[in-house]
Amino acid sequence: MKRASDPYNPEANPEERWDEHRYGTGSGSDRAPSKAASPLAPGRYRSRYRTDAACFDLGMLIAKVLAFAWQNPPAPLSLSAQSLREIAPLMLNKGAGALTWRRIRCSSLRDTEMAEELRQAYRLHTLEAALREIEIGQIFLFLRSLGLEPLMGKGWVIARQYPELGLRPYGDIDFYVRPEQHGAFESALQKPEAQGWNIDLHRGAAELDDRGFDELYARSRLVRLGEAEVRTFGPEDHLRLLCLHMLREGALRPLWLCDIAVALDSPPPDFDWDYFLSGNQRRSDWAACAIGLAHQLLGATVEGLPVAARAGNLPRWLVPVALRQWGKGKATKGRRAPMSDHLRHPSGALKSLWERWPNAIEATVGVNGPFNNWPRLPFQIGECVARTAGFARRIPGLLRASN
């Protein structure tokens, strides 16, 4: 794959390039943006999203801290202690605490109270990552002994590309299996030897179902992990998976965008962009827009890539929606209480419904819509109606199960 040159000022350090790109300054400070209308200048979007101005500004701070955070070594970060206090809880909650510590550990902020919490998160993630690597090797050896071979994605597969072990925490282990083998995997994971393993077993690969599973498997890679070999998606399929998963989940976690930036920063020499962009063309455009988000918010390099034009010409709603989600700290789907909990105990149902109102990114992907400049409200209403109808069809079965 052709390595693109830096699209920013090559004479400036990454932090200055980030500020220059967004604020029209090279200061690297927290001061107010200049009047120059750069792509991410807060004033450009505030007029449309006044009620969410505080969330937007928090999102901007989060983007500033995470921009170029994967580089080795990371650029110095100029950030006030007050700004760190504001964003640190969000970073810790969204799994980006270790990356934040990496950005500030060589600055005067390393001695603040919030920095200590971030440092502890980094230490914990490093220990957990070491233990999880041992576990992953054991799981593959166990499954192979039964003649089963899953494809692994996200989690450890992208975490290993970060410059340090504990920078990218992950919870469950994502295995993608042939639909016809799903039952065999479920049976294997119920054996006593498999107890305690936190595995998310996917029947097929939903985000990549425009490609046959045989093709995904044929392009997979074996990666050495201790005494085991781990089978992962090929780099093109995995980057596409990261992009589409992030969008499907509404870009709620900034760490998911860091994953895309890291994958773009260290691709194999034979990365096939034609294959990456093959398949369903709407999904390919979504993936190009996800790369554009990584470029515009985190500074990921796209110059010279086939997606560069699209990355620089995103729908006008996409960047502010992502930033507002980061600033809100909204819970991801896996951390929300099930709506079925409210069938017999309706208190809190309205709050849960509001939490499930899809943002513009999530809704557009949910209804298979285009990423263009049309208003997003119709997509959001359509996605909400579809979800409500789906839940209504499940209510009789849920009530019977609860009796």
Image (spheres, rainbow, N blue to C red):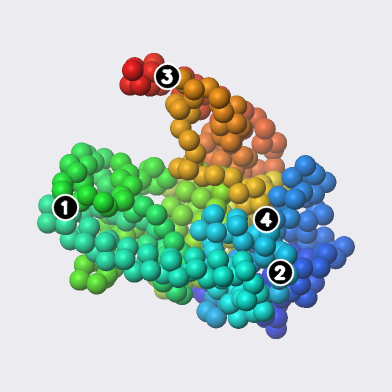
How far is disc 1 from disc 2 in space, using C-alphas? 48 Å
Q: Mark 1: which amino acid?
A: Glu
Closer to the camera in the image, 310 or 343: 343
Q: Tell me residue 106's x, y (percent).
A: 60, 81
Q: Are marks 3 and 1 in contact (CB under 8 Å)?
A: no
Quote the CA–CA distance across marks 4 and 2.
Answer: 17 Å
Q: How would you rate the neighbour count of disc 1 (Cα within 10 Å): few for under 14, some for 14-19, many for 20 or more? A: few
Q: Residue at x 75, y 50 (%)?
A: 54
| CA gap, disc 3 and disc 1 | 36 Å
Left or right: residue 13 versus residue 271 is: right
CA neighbours of label 4 inside 10 A, class few (<14), some (14 to 19), many (20+): many
Secondary structure under badge 2?
Answer: helix
Side (left or right) of 331 relative to 297: left
Q: Position of residue 287 (x, y in %)?
A: 52, 52
- For label 2, count other residues whose C-alpha is less than 10 Å away and answer few (under 14), some (14-19) or many (20+): some
Callout 2, which amino acid? Ala
For disc 1, the marked residue is: 193
Query: Observer-nearest residue: 33 or 239?
Result: 33
Earlier residue among tags 3 and 2:
2
Distance between the alpha carbons at the discs numbered 4 and 3: 37 Å
Q: Nearer the viewer, mark 3 or mark 1?
A: 1
- Residue at mark 3: 395
| Label 4 vs 2, first from the N-terminus | 4
Residue 279 image position (x, y, % from top left): 43, 47
Query: Which of the two residues, 336 or 300, is positioned nearer the viewer here?
Result: 336
Q: Left or right: where does residue 50 sit relative to residue 91?
A: right
Q: Quadrant of the C terminus?
A: top left
